[in-house]
Image (cartoon, grey):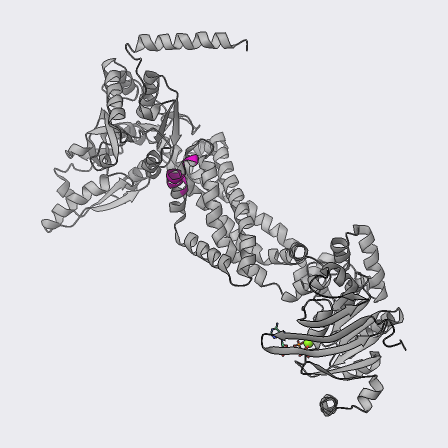
C-alpha cells in the first residue's frame, strides 16, 4: 500500500466551483498518494466529472487549491505541460474518427511534443502493444468494438507519458468482458507507478481496482475509505442509500 | 537604346503623314481625353461596334474607326474597353472611360446626365420576317409582340405608343426585352416576336448575315432616333471640342471612307468580316469555336475567376463560421448583418457597385491596377463568402464537442485542435454543399461580363453578334461549361474516397486495399 500524505501526488484543499448560482463543488479537500488508485463514486450530478476535470483544468476551479506533483494549478499554469502530465480517458472514447488507430496515438506526441513521425509511431505501437491492440493499428476507429476503442483511447493518453490518469466512466458503454479488460490495464498501470483517479457507476469494477473509494454527494466528499470498508460498513446514511440502490441492479 | 532614334524618326513620319492627311488637325485634346482616350463600347452591334474575327479583343466597326480618328486628331493613344451595354453609362459616370461610343442614339433623357455629340445620322426601323406585310403606323402593332434590346431607350418610347393605344381602347404592344441585339433578332427568326426594333444601319449590315430573312415593315419618324451620338461626362468645353473634332473629320473627308468601308453609304466597299448564316448546324463553326484560343482563354478566365473567388470565400468564411458558433457578441452580429445583406442583394448589383460606384467614393479604384478581373474577384468572393459561412458553420457544429475536448485533454492548442481534429472532419460534411456552391459560382461568373470581363459567355455573345451562328457558339460554350463542371464532380469523388473512415464497410475495403 502506498503511504498516504508522505509527498502526495495530488493535494486538494477547499476546492470550490459553481456554474452561476449553482455550487457544484463545495470545499472539497483530499490527497492522493503517488501510485494510488482512487475510485470516485456518487449519485448522478454530485460533481464527480467536474472534480476530475479540474485536475487537467478542462474546467477551471473558482477557489481553493490544487497541487499536482508539487505544482500549483491555477490560471498561470501552462496548459500544454499540465495536460502532458495528467492524461484523461472519456466514457465515449472520443477517438479521432478520421485517423487510424496508429495515427490517433501518434498525432498528440507529434503536434504537442514535436516528436518525429517515426519516433511518435514507435511510441504509439509500444503503448498499443501494452493495451493489447497492436494488431488493429491500421484500422479506423469505426471498425473496432467499444472495448477495443476504449483500449486505444487509453493507449493514446499514455502516449503523452503522463504521471496521473483520469478516467471518467471508462466502462459505462462496455460489456462485462471488455470491462474486465480495462480493469486489467488499469491494474497494470498502477503496478508501474501510475496514479489513477476513476469515476464509475459499476460497483464490481470499483471494488476490483480501487485502493481507496471517495464517495461524493452534492459537491461534497462524504466518505473516503478502502473499498472493503466502504462497501461493507459505509458510515453515512447517504452512502448506505446509494449502495442499496446500486445493488438492486 | 540603339533603336530609339529610329523609333523617333518613325513617329515623326507618322505625325507628318497625319498632318498631311488631316490639314489643321493639331487640336488640343479635351479634358476627358487628356493623356489618352479611353473608349467604352459594347461590341455586339455590327456595323457600329463588334468583334471582327475570333480574337475578342480585336474590335471593328464605325465607332472603332471614328474613335481612332479622334485619337489621331488629338494626338493621344486610344484604348478600348468592351463591356455589356448595361455597364456603359455607369462606367462613364465612374470615370473609367472618357467617352462612350457604341451605336447609342442621341436621346434627350440621356442628355440630362451626359453630354451627347452626334456623329452619324440614322433612323429607327421596325423589322419583321421577310414576307410580312408592311404596316402604316405604330398603332398597327397593337396586340403584337415586339422585341427590343434592354438597356436601350426603345422600350420606353414604345410604352408611349401604348399610352395612346390604351386611350383608344386598343390592346397594347407587348414589349419583350433581351440583353443583346442578336438575341432580339433571334426572337423574330424563331417566331416568338412579331417584329423587332433596330437602327437602319445595323439592319443593313445584318441583312447579309441573315440572307434576307427579315425586312423593314415600318419606319416611324421619331425625332429622338435620328442620330448616333458619342457620350461624355457633362462639360461644355469638352462638348464643344468634341463637336469641333467631329465636324473637322467630316470636313476633311475622313468620315466618308469609314462609312463606305462599313457600307453605310451607297456604293460602299465589300462587306467585311461576316460569315453566312448557314441553314442547319454548322459543325465547322462549332469545331473551330471549340478549339479557338479566344474560347479557351475565356474558359480559363471563367475557371480562374470561379476557383480564386471560391477559395477566397472559403478562407473568409472559416473564421466567420468559428465566430458564429461561439458566444454572442458584436462581431457575431456584424457577421450576421453581412450575411443577410450579401445574400439579399443581387450579385449583378454587387458587381456593378464594386466596379462603378466604388471609384466614386475612393478615387484609387479608378486607377489601372483595379482591373475588371480584380473587381469581379473581390465582389464574387465577398458575395460567395456570405453563403459559405452557413455551410462552414453547420459543418463545424456537426462535429461532436467530445472531439475538441479530447484534443484539449491531450495538450493540443486551440489551433492544433482545429487543424488536426475538427477541420478534417468538417471538410467531409462541408464538401458536397461546397461543390454545389462552386458549380453555381462557375455560372455566376458570367455576370462579370457587365464589368467588361471577357469570360466565356461574353466571348460567346460577341461571336454570336458577329456571325449570327448562335446555335454553334452556344453549343461550344456549353461544352466548356460541362467540361469544367464534370471535372469538379470528378475531383469531389476523388476527395470523398479519402472519407472512407466515416463508413464501416468502406473503411474495411479501404484497409484491405
Ligand atoms: N457547463 C455546465 N453548466 C452548468 N451546469 C453544469 C455544467 N456542467 C455540469 N453542470 C452541473 O453540475 C452538476 C455536476 O455535474 P457533473 O457532470 O460533475 O456530475 P457527475 O457527478 O459527473 O454526474 P454523472 O454521474 O451523471 O456523470 C450537475 O448538476 C450538472 O447539471
Ligand atoms: Mg459525470
The span shown in magenta is: B354-364
Left or right, A86 with respect to B497, comes to right
Residue plotted at (30% across, 24% down): B62
Image position of A13 with respect to A58: above or below: below
Is residue A50 visible in the rendered structure shown here? yes
Residue B253 picture quarter? top left
The quadrant of the rendered image in which ligand 2 is seen is: bottom right
Residue A247 picture quarter? bottom right
Left or right, B325 with respect to A247, comes to left
Q: Position of residue B494 (x, y in %)?
A: 63, 50
Indicate the quadrant containing the N terminus of chain B: top left, top right, bottom left or bottom right: top right
Residue plotted at (68% across, 57% down): B413
Q: Nearer the viewer, residue A143 or A67?
A: A67
Q: Nearer the viewer, residue B44 or B225?
A: B225
Q: Position of residue B350 (x, y in %)?
A: 40, 46
In reply to whether residue B357 is colored magenta, the answer given is: yes
Amino acid at each position: 500500500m502506498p503511504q498516504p500524505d508522505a509527498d502526495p501526488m495530488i493535494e486538494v484543499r477547499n476546492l470550490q466551483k459553481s456554474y452561476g448560482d449553482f455550487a457544484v463543488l463545495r470545499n472539497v479537500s483530499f490527497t492522493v498518494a503517488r501510485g494510488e488508485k482512487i475510485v470516485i463514486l456518487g449519485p448522478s450530478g454530485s460533481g464527480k466529472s467536474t472534480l476530475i476535470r479540474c485536475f487537467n483544468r478542462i474546467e477551471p476551479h473558482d477557489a481553493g487549491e490544487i497541487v499536482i506533483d508539487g505544482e500549483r494549478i491555477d490560471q498561470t499554469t501552462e496548459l500544454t505541460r499540465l495536460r502532458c502530465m495528467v492524461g484523461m480517458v472519456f466514457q465515449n472514447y472520443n477517438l479521432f474518427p478520421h485517423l487510424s488507430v496508429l495515427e490517433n496515438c501518434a498525432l498528440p506526441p507529434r503536434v504537442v511534443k514535436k516528436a518525429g513521425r517515426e519516433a511518435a509511431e514507435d511510441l504509439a505501437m509500444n503503448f498499443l502493444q501494452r493495451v493489447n491492440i497492436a494488431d488493429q493499428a491500421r484500422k479506423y476507429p469505426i471498425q473496432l468494438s467499444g472495448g477495443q476503442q476504449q483500449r486505444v483511447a487509453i493507449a493514446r493518453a499514455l502516449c503523452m507519458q503522463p504521471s496521473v490518469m483520469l478516467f471518467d466512466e471508462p466502462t459505462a458503454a462496455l460489456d462485462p468482458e471488455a470491462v474486465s479488460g480495462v480493469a486489467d490495464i488499469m491494474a497494470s498501470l498502477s503496478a508501474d507507478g501510475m496514479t489513477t483517479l476513476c469515476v464509475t457507476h459499476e460497483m464490481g469494477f470499483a471494488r476490483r481496482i480501487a485502493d481507496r473509494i471517495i464517495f461524493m454527494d452534492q459537491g461534497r466528499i462524504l466518505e473516503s475509505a478502502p473499498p472493503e470498508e466502504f462497501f461493507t460498513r459505509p458510515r453515512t446514511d447517504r452512502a448506505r442509500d446509494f449502495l442499496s440502490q446500486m445493488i438492486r441492479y | 537604346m540603339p533603336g530609339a532614334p529610329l523609333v523617333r524618326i518613325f513617329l515623326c513620319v507618322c505625325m507628318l503623314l497625319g498632318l498631311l492627311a488631316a490639314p489643321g488637325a493639331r487640336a488640343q485634346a479635351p479634358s476627358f481625353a487628356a493623356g489618352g482616350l479611353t473608349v467604352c463600347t459594347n461590341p455586339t452591334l455590327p456595323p457600329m461596334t463588334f468583334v471582327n474575327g475570333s480574337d475578342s479583343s480585336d474590335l471593328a466597326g464605325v465607332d472603332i474607326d471614328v474613335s481612332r480618328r479622334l485619337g489621331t486628331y488629338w494626338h493621344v493613344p486610344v484604348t478600348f474597353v468592351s463591356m455589356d451595354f448595361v455597364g456603359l453609362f455607369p462606367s462613364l459616370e465612374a470615370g473609367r472611360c472618357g467617352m462612350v461610343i457604341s451605336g447609342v442614339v442621341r436621346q434627350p433623357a440621356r442628355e440630362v446626365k451626359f453630354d451627347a455629340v452626334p456623329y452619324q445620322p440614322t433612323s429607327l426601323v421596325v423589322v419583321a420576317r421577310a414576307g410580312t406585310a408592311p404596316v402604316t403606323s405604330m398603332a398597327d402593332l397593337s396586340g403584337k409582340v415586339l422585341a427590343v434590346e434592354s438597356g436601350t431607350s426603345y422600350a420606353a418610347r414604345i410604352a408611349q405608343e401604348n399610352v395612346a393605344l390604351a386611350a383608344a381602347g386598343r390592346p397594347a404592344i407587348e414589349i419583350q426585352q433581351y440583353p443583346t441585339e442578336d438575341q432580339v433578332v433571334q426572337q423574330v427568326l424563331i417566331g416568338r416576336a412579331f417584329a423587332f426594333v433596330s437602327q437602319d444601319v445595323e439592319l443593313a449590315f445584318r441583312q447579309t448575315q441573315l440572307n434576307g430573312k427579315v425586312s423593314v415593315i415600318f419606319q416611324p419618324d421619331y425625332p429622338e432616333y435620328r442620330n448616333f451620338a458619342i457620350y461624355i461626362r457633362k462639360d461644355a468645353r469638352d462638348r464643344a471640342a468634341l463637336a469641333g473634332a467631329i465636324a473637322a473629320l467630316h470636313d476633311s473627308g475622313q468620315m466618308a471612307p469609314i462609312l463606305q468601308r462599313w457600307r453605310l453609304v451607297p456604293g460602299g466597299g465589300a462587306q467585311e468580316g461576316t460569315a453566312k448564316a448557314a441553314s442547319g448546324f454548322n459543325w465547322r463553326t462549332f469545331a473551330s469555336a471549340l478549339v479557338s484560343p479566344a474560347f479557351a482563354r475565356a474558359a480559363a478566365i471563367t475557371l480562374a475567376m470561379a476557383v480564386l473567388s471560391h477559395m477566397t470565400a472559403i478562407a473568409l468564411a472559416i473564421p466567420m463560421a468559428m465566430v458564429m458558433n461561439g458566444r454572442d457578441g458584436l462581431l457575431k452580429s456584424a457577421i450576421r448583418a453581412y450575411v443577410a445583406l450579401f445574400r439579399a442583394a443581387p450579385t449583378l448589383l454587387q458587381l456593378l457597385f464594386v466596379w462603378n460606384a466604388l471609384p466614386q467614393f475612393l478615387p484609387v479604384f479608378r486607377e489601372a491596377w483595379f482591373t475588371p478581373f480584380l473587381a469581379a474577384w473581390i465582389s464574387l468572393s465577398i458575395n460567395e463568402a456570405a453563403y459559405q459561412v452557413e455551410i462552414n458553420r453547420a459543418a463545424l457544429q456537426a462535429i461532436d464537442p467530445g472531439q475538441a475536448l479530447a484534443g484539449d485533454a491531450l495538450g493540443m492548442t486551440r489551433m492544433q485542435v482545429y487543424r488536426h481534429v475538427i477541420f478534417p472532419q468538417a471538410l467531409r460534411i462541408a464538401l458536397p454543399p461546397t461543390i454545389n456552391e462552386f458549380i453555381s459560382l462557375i455560372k455566376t461568373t458570367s455576370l462579370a461580363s457587365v464589368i467588361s470581363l471577357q469570360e466565356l459567355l461574353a466571348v460567346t455573345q460577341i461571336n454570336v453578334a458577329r456571325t449570327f451562328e448562335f446555335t454553334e457558339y452556344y453549343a461550344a460554350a456549353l461544352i466548356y461549361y460541362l467540361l469544367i463542371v464534370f471535372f469538379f464532380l470528378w475531383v469531389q469523388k476523388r476527395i470523398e474516397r479519402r472519407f472512407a473512415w466515416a463508413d464501416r464497410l468502406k473503411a474495411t475495403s479501404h484497409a484491405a486495399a
